Amino acid sequence: MMKKSLLTIGLMMLFLVDAFSQCPMCKASVESSQSSNTKSVGMGLNTGILMLMGAVYVILFTVGFLWYKNFKKSQEVNG
């Protein structure tokens, strides 16, 4: 079990480099749009970030709700 966890963490660390490479690209994109007085790129990036963040909360809420529903059902059967 411990070996699988370490292997998983190691593989995640390998892919972490790709995630960091996107930040300078986004920063350059926003800086170039600000110099040309168009704010649509920055607003688009902010909207995308909010949607990605919102998706995580929707998934967590759904999992929590389903867990609660199953927990209550098992309590009624056992109780």
Image (cartoon, helix red, strand yellow):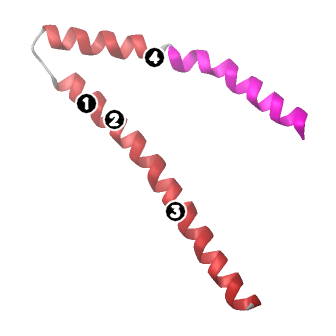
Query: Where residue 22 is drawn, which disc sits there?
Result: 4
Check contact, mark 3 vs mark 2: CB within 8 A.
no
Q: Give the distance between the C-alpha atoms of the residues marked 4 and 3, in whole angstroms.
A: 29 Å
Per the image, is 57 magenta? no
The overriding secondary structure of the stretch rendered in magenta is helix
| Type of the residue with mark 1 | Gly
Q: On the image, numbered disc 3 is attached to which residue?
A: 62
In the image, 29 versus 70, the foreground residue is: 70
Q: Of the two numbered discs 4 and 3 on the same chain, state the one appearing first in sequence.
A: 4
Query: Disc 2 versus disc 1: distance between alpha carbons?
Result: 6 Å
Q: Quadrant location of residue 45?
A: top left
Q: Which mark is residue 56?
A: none
Start-end of magenta stretch: 1-20
Q: Which residue is mark 1?
A: 44
Q: Name the amino acid type tagged 4.
A: Gln
Eye-nearest disc, 1 or 3: 3
Residue 48 circle label? 2
N-terminal label among 1 and 3: 1
Distance (Cα) linking label 4 and label 1? 15 Å
Q: CA distance from mark 3 to mark 2?
A: 21 Å
The total of numbered circles placed on residues is: 4
Q: Secondary structure at mark 1?
A: helix
